[in-house]
Amino acid sequence: MCSVKKIYNISYIEAEFGILDLVNQVREFLERNVYETANDPQLAAKRIVSDATVQAYTSLEIPVPSQDVDDNNAYQLQHVRTTGDKTWQRGEPRRDAVWVRITEMKLRAESEKCNIRGYNGQVIGLLNAVFILRGKSQEIYKLAHITRLNWIGNGKPGGPEGMSFLGKFTGREGQNMVWVQAIEGPAHLIPLEPSWN
């Protein structure tokens, strides 16, 4: 993680980044992915969410394999950014698209009810927030919030340009907490509508 680090609580991030119901989304994610074997998962997750301090970030550095070098161990850092409701370089707010591997985590119940279509175990989402949750007992959770995009039609890239078509979920099922380490790289999208993000 990089860029400006600010200390908040989760409610402040909810307002700063324009994410509805973030407190409950974080609590539910921790219940399902961290405290699922605790005696009372809801109480354990509620405790960490209410007591934790939060460090928010506006960008994330992701090591991706270098296309310019023949060495399989060569990586380069790529940056993905999110500005919440604030403008990016005097323009529109920025929420970069990212590839997220979802096979190792349990998403919110609304998401599991809908047909999650991915490509090689990954989905594409718009990055809404990146933050570290620090509990009073030294727990540290590196989290991100995304708005998941859904493949329209066949999810397999096709045509001479190798493109797929995506649409944004409009309900709660598209809003997901994910582990930061599950973000595998930037997704390069070409918007077909002027204001899609």
Image (cartoon, rainbow, N blue to C red):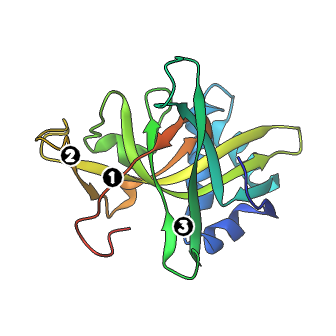
Q: Residue furthest bottom?
A: 90
Label 1 to label 2: alpha-carbon separation: 12 Å
Location of mark 2 (residue): 164
Q: Nearer the viewer, residue 104 or 57?
A: 57
Residue 135 percent location from the top left of the image: 83, 45
Q: How many numbered tags mark residues here?
A: 3
Q: Which mark is residue 149?
A: 1
Mark 2 lies on a secondary structure that is: loop
Q: Nearer the viewer, residue 8 or 1?
A: 1
Mark 3 and mark 2 lie on one chain; the one further toward the N terminus is 3
Tag 3 near tag 1, CB within 8 Å = no
Label 3 to label 1: alpha-carbon separation: 16 Å
Q: Which mark is residue 120?
A: none
Q: Amino acid at mark 3?
A: Ile
Q: Amino acid at mark 1?
A: Leu
Mark 3 lies on a secondary structure that is: loop
Front position among marks 3 and 1: 1
Location of mark 3 (residue): 19
Tag 1 near tag 2, CB within 8 Å = no
Q: Is residue 86 above or below residue 197?
A: below
Q: Quadrant of residue 119?
A: top left
Residue 134 percent location from the top left of the image: 81, 46
Mark 3 and mark 1 lie on one chain; the one further toward the N terminus is 3
Q: Quadrant of residue 159?
A: top left
Mark 1 lies on a secondary structure that is: strand
Dot 1 crowding, Cα within 10 Å, few <14, some 14–19, many 20+ = many
Q: Amino acid at mark 2?
A: Ser
Mark 1 and mark 2 lie on one chain; the one further toward the N terminus is 1
Residue 47 percent location from the top left of the image: 77, 48
Front position among marks 3 and 2: 2
The quarter of the picture where the C terminus appears is bottom left
Dot 2 crowding, Cα within 10 Å, few <14, some 14–19, many 20+ = some
